[in-house]
Amino acid sequence: MITLRGVSKDYRTREGGRHVLRDINLQIDRGAKIGILGRNGSGKSTLIRLIGGAEHPTCGVIKREMTVSWPLAFSGGFQGSLTGLDNLRFICRVYGADIDRARPFVEDFSELGVYFREPVKTYSAGMRARLAFALSMAIEFDCYLIDEVLAVGDSRFHEKCHHELFEKRRDRALLMVSHLPQHIREYCSTIYVLSAARIQRFDDVDEAYAYFAECG
Amino acid sequence: MVSDTPLFRSLAIQARVIGALLLREIITRYGRHNIGFFWLFLEPMIFTLGVTLLYGYLRPMHGAMSIIPFAITGYSSVLMWRNAASRCSKAIEPNLSLLYHRNVTTLDIFGARLLLEISGATISLIVLLAVFIFAGYAPMPADPLTMVGAWLLLAWFGGALGLIVGALSERSQTFERIWHTLTYLMFPLSGALFMVDWLPAKAQSLILWVPMVHGVEMLRDGYFGSAVRTHYDVGYLVLVNFIMLWVGLLLIDRGKYLVASE
């Protein structure tokens, strides 16, 4: 279980402090599928970073009693001169996973062929996306964080991702953030709407949308 | 954030993460072609060697002390704190996205870079001294243990300075620019180019406020032994190191909150 109690986050701007999140209370149970709806700039990504532990709240408590992934398929950590294999090694070392066990899956899923041993800077956008997703699946977590559903790749890639995440790992918790309602409608049973730095919980999907459209 | 991770496990994770960052840094910086990571100590070696040879030609022997080990001990000490600090300057920004992996902290990023720089400077010092000793251009060190002590204190100083410079450079661009000027100003004051004993008494008491001077003097005391008169205070350097490390860790801890998204 992951619990957020009274979590707030401020950022400094030139005009002084800005409250991005205020008094957020949220709970993720094992296997829960949670969607977070919010406009651009409403603080969704900040919330993901706080839950993932990349940033710390200004005040409040975040308690993690299960393992949490980094934002799914996040490729910002790729360094151009490192190869796909180097990146796999790095991830495995950081998370204490066995490289030899993770490697066959990543090689197979990413379909990089000989490029697996070439620098990432020679990759196309699709290749990067495949590697990033494969790396996210190389380490097993209890809860996966998804910051906007994958926009890159072809339909076959999307199918493969869908299979890995929503079928093979259906017992895991998911926290999905999006500004596009249809994605959240498809996968989530509990929905939070984020607006004006505050969060509101809905168990009924339609109610959440009505509120989301209203507070726009 | 509540941390339930026991200390021992935290340390194990930190060691693993720093190891991973270290290997990543080596490949990124030196690549895997040609002589690759040998540049880690070849770079400081070539620099020290160049300056040493230049010195050897320009200056006659100073009393009982030969100029080559004098230059090597001096420049290696400068490289230690200068490189350690410079590599920490703006170290976080290019690695910001790695902080998405919760186990990776800003301290780990600095730690990996410091470890790399300190090892590079250390290997460079050992190799250069060994080569010149075997070639007969330098005497054997009088007291290697004192040298090791001095070197560790200098490494500690470099590491603490690195944390401070790294944290401040992330907060202020002005600091980053001033830092470069500062290193040039600090270089002649750091004790690399002179022995404290050569200075007039009044200048001696002033220069001994500079912490690096104590490290270099101690290093030379270990190398030359009774052949030279050195002036240093281990207690002073340890005290300064403690304070600087404390300040550095404090700045980084606060920096955590300022490291926002890209």
Image (tube, grey):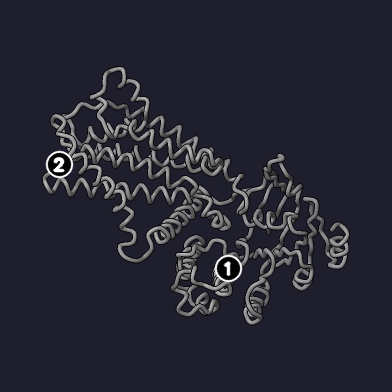
Which residue is at a point 39% across and 49% down the rendered structure image?
A: B115
Residue farthest to the bottom?
Answer: A156
Q: Which type of secondary structure does the marked residue at label 1 adopt?
A: helix
Q: Position of residue A18 (x, y in %)?
A: 73, 44
Give me the C-alpha separation between circle 1 and circle 2. Answer: 56 Å
- Viewed as shown, does residue A66 lie left or right of B135? right
Q: Nearer the viewer, mark 1 or mark 2?
A: 2
Residue farthest to the front?
Answer: B58
Q: Position of residue B252 (x, y in %)?
A: 53, 42
Query: Which residue, given by chain and number where applicable, does mark 2 sit on?
Result: B138
Above-or-below relation of A67 to B249 = below
Q: Which type of secondary structure does the marked residue at label 2 adopt?
A: loop
| Circle 1 crowding by C-alpha within 10 Å: few under 14, some 14–19, many from 20 | many
Residue type indicated by callout 2: Ala
Write down the quadrant of residue B204 in the picture: top left
Write down the quadrant of residue A130 in the picture: bottom right
Residue type indicated by callout 1: Ser
Which residue is at a point 51% across and 42% down the rendered structure image?
A: B169
- Depth check: give the residue in front, A152 or B107: A152
Assign the C terminus of chain B to one quadrant of the image.
bottom right
Above-or-below relation of B123 to B232 = below
Q: Which mark is residue A136?
A: 1
Identify the chain of the residue marked 1, using the numbered disc in the image.
Answer: A
Q: Which mark is residue B70?
A: none
- Depth check: give the residue in front, A196 or B199: B199
- Viewed as shown, does residue A89 lie left or right of A29? left
Which residue is at a point 51% across and 61% down the rendered structure image?
A: A95
Write down the quadrant of residue B141 in the picture: top left
Q: Position of residue B247 (x, y in %)?
A: 50, 35
